[in-house]
Image (spheres, rainbow, N blue to C red):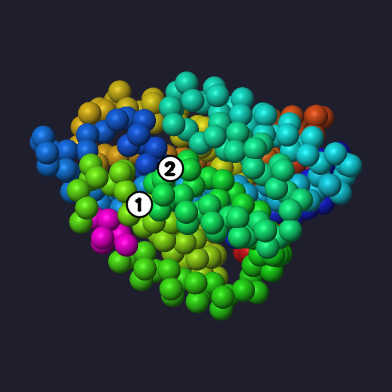
Amino acid sequence: MDPDRAHPRIQDLDAVRGVALCGFLVVNICQLTDMRATVEPGIVDPIRHLLSVLFEGRFFPIFSFLFGLSFSLFFDRAAQRTDRPRLVLARRLIALGVLGLIHHAFQPGEALLPYAIVGSVILLPAAGLPRWVLLLAGLVCTIGVPVALGGGFGLVPGLFLLGLAADRFGLADDLRDRVWRIVVVFALAAPAAVAAGMWEYRIPYAELWTGSVAPLAGMLGALAYLTGVLLFLRTETGEVFAEVLEPMGRMALTNYLSATALILTADPWLHLSDSNRYGMLLGLAFAIIAVQALWSYHWLHWFRYGPFEWVLRCVTWWQLVPNRLTRQERRKLTVAYGRGR
């Protein structure tokens, strides 16, 4: 029996995760191919600088926040099935760390291994803390780290705790009933993100990684993107996009790992390494997104989980979890997609 089948997924969070996956892809292509940031010595490529303002530091915080929130949801499910939920989650984090260690050989600086380490050190002990303690600790870490130490993986502990606190405050339970609150946050975050992005763009590219401007602008941008996507999903057009984004988000681990393979395979043919071919970069990103969207959509019409998601689930519960959908389940899924969300 599948331990998680009684717990329906939250579609909006899967769609947001899919958006973050798409944005994160642009950054990963830059890093994996080691594209040139300058057009000549001392002169930064303006397109690279613009891409850094639009993408770098904007989607990593969303992933981290959702990881903390998903950890909380999974912890509660595990607590309903066993009196040792931390052991279940520890196995999950160990498996994630092993995947990250292997992935690190192909993409240095990848996120899975740090997520597994920080999750073991921060999330496992914090899972039982009061929600106000989680919120306060998350805010202090998330705000204090950019100001004192800069961004990067230093933001992960605070964002994990904020995600954990968000679930404890019931954010995931009634997300669709919080429209006006999301509107207010977006109305405040969007202009602040634009102003911070303009400020960031005026700073020389080489100086972005030594101060607090980039991480603060990235956090504001992430908040604007997050709330903006949640509002967009409530429109008719957003519902159409959600049918593409949700499967990608449900298979985020598989898509994250497979993107590395696709980038490394395409680079020798596209010659992105040590180049300024940023138009080609965006073309490659679009092609990978199209392939993964199509692959995810069709895969999840036959299986409950993506390949790596299934492996992770089997290790987590230490049992062979059924993955293939029955004919009746596929029929219900087809009807559900035909009716829309």
The answer to whether the residues at label 1 and label 2 have Cβ atoms under 8 Å apart is no
User: Which quarter of the rendered picture does the C terminus lie within?
Assistant: bottom right
Q: What's the mark number on residue 152?
A: 2
Which tag, 1 or 2, sits closer to the chain's start?
Answer: 2
Q: Amino acid at mark 2?
A: Gly
* Image-quadrant location for residue 307: top right
Point out the stretch of residues depicted in magenta.
196-201
Task: Locate residue 310, reporting x and y percent.
Answer: 69, 34
* Image-quadrant location for residue 337: bottom right
Magenta span main SS:
helix
- Report which residue position mark 1 lands on: 212
How far apart marks 1 and 2 lie (CA) works out to: 11 Å
Comparing 293 with 10, the one in front is 10
Magenta stretch containing residue 123, yes or no? Answer: no
Task: Give the residue drawn at x 49%, y 47%.
Answer: 155
Task: Locate residue 169, reporting x and y percent.
Answer: 69, 65
Task: Give the residue drawn at x 30%, y 44%.
Answer: 210
Task: Give the residue drawn at x 68%, y 40%.
Answer: 305
Comparing 228 with 329, the one in front is 228
Q: Amino acid at mark 1?
A: Ser
Comparing 196 with 284, the one in front is 196
Taking 102 as reference, is 58 left or right?
left
Give above or below for 44 relative to 241: above
Task: Give the residue drawn at x 47%, y 61%.
Answer: 223
Give above or below for 52 relative to 96: below
Task: Locate residue 159, reporting x and y percent.
Answer: 55, 51
User: Which quarter of the rendered picture does the N terminus lie within?
Assistant: top right
Count numbered badges in the picture. 2
Give above or below for 113 relative to 68: above
Q: Could you tell me if residue 254 is visible in this image? A: no
